[in-house]
Image (cartoon, rainbow, N blue to C red):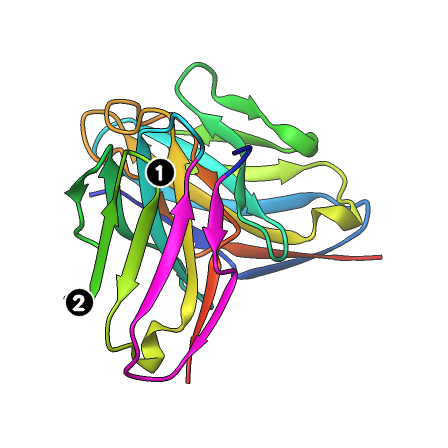
Amino acid sequence: AQSVTQLGSHVSVSEGALVLLRCNYSSSVPPYLFWYVQYPNQGLQLLLKYTSAATLVKGINGFEAEFKKSETSFHLTKPSAHMSDAAEYFCAVTRSGGSYIPTFGRGTSLIVHP
Amino acid sequence: GAGVSQSPSNKVTEKGKDVELRCDPISGHTALYWYRQSLGQGLEFLIYFQGNSAPDKSGLPSDRFSAERTGGSVSTLTIQRTQQEDSAVYLCASSLAGQGAPNEKLFFGSGTQLSVL
């Protein structure tokens, strides 16, 4: 079975501060990992994905994530938060040779204060 | 179309009534997924289509839920005898290949907000 755990249902930061959203995965085989973002009243859209080509993955809007096998983590970061980053963020996992249907975490709501 | 389209965007119904939710995937996408999003619960997988077949319907919560896909395109999710616990946002997503391509991204619609009174 595969699963992801997102620590913290809400994260609050000031504009310009570092953003760190945590995701830990569980998978018996090397996983594929994804971060999706959902803006209010919209569907989810892909921010970035890890497919084993490189452990540090850069995505859209200045976000990046690092795959750490030893920690089973795939945390999402952005050096400087912008008001427009306020949204719900979801981590997801699939794996080769097994379930190709993405399993999503519960989501983390990012709140950005001026 | 340019993206995944879902209708209606909002649906209010009375307990016990049947509802149908529609999803138009991106043209040419063979894989189609239904998820349910409840407050604080994240995305719950319901059913997956590859073409018109549903090789994985393990997430359907009860026999009141059913779905079909026709012509390898439009999909309809039907909930019979709705209950208050069915209230949620129902999201549809599509992808180009699906099975055999676990690293491809999903394209999501904006969802249908279902409220059962």
Q: Is residue A71 visible?
A: no
Number of marks in the rendered image = 2
Q: Quadrant of the N terminus of chain A?
A: top left
Of residue B114 and residue B73, the one placed in the foreground of this image is B73
Q: Which span is picked out in magenta?
A: B4-25
The answer to whether mark 1 and mark 2 are in CB contact below 8 A is: no
The disc at residue B62 is: 2
The disc at residue A93 is: 1
* Residue B68 image position (x, y, % from top left): 23, 49
Q: Is residue A64 visible?
A: yes
**A12 magenta-colored:** no
Of residue B60 and residue A68, the one placed in the foreground of this image is B60
Q: Is residue A84 above or below residue A98?
A: below
Q: Is residue A15 left or right of residue A75?
A: right
The amino acid type found where label 1 is placed reads Val
Of residue A65 and residue B32, the one placed in the foreground of this image is B32
Is circle 1 on the same chain as circle 2?
Answer: no
The amino acid type found where label 2 is placed reads Ser
Q: Could you give the CA–CA distance between mark 1 and mark 2, rounded to whole angstroms?
A: 25 Å
Residue drawn at point x = 24 percent, y = 77 percent = B81
* Residue reaching furthest to the top: A53
Subunit of label 1? A
Q: Secondary structure at mark 2?
A: loop
